[in-house]
Image (tube, rainbow, N blue to C red):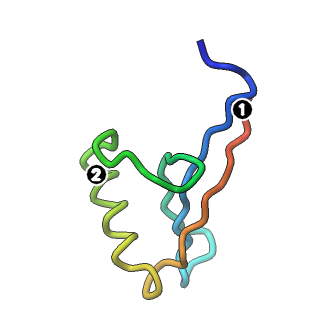
Amino acid sequence: MSSLSETRYEIRFQSLFSEGRALSFPCDAQGHVQIDALSEQARHNYLYARVLVGREYATPTVLALCAH
């Protein structure tokens, strides 16, 4: 059973060229992504975003997600 106060996190790669475009993935508080837990498409997108930091995407940020 998970606690309502349990904080979840995501790592977000914001596009440098389109304000509304970003890729985000579940992670821990330090920004570590469990790559094996991602779908094949999400894994591809995550690796793509990492490679293009500084060219297509800004340095990623880790965000705490609010529990609803």
Q: Is residue 40 left or right of residue 42?
A: left
Circle 1: residue type: Ala
Q: Is residue 24 left or right of residue 8?
A: left
Q: Which residue is mark 1?
A: 67
Q: Which residue is mark 2?
A: 41
- Secondary element under disc 1, as helix, strand or loop, is loop
Give percent across and percent down for residue 11. Answer: 54, 57
Q: Residue drawn 39% across and 70% down?
A: 49
Q: Is residue 24 above or below residue 55?
A: above
Dot 1: within a 10 Å radius of its alpha carbon, few (fewer than 14), some, or many (20 or more) residues?
Answer: few
Quarter that holds the C terminus:
top right
Q: Is residue 57 above or below residue 12?
A: below
- Which residue is the extreme one toward the top? 1
Circle 2: residue type: Gln
Residue 45: image quadrant is bottom left
Q: Nearer the viewer, residue 29 or 62?
A: 29
Q: Is residue 24 above or below residue 16?
A: above
- Secondary element under disc 2, as helix, strand or loop, is helix
Between label 2 and label 1, give the one nearer the viewer: 1
User: Earlier along the polypeptide chain: callout 2 or callout 1?
Assistant: 2
- Which residue is the extreme one toward the bottom? 55
Q: Is residue 10 left or right of residue 39?
A: right
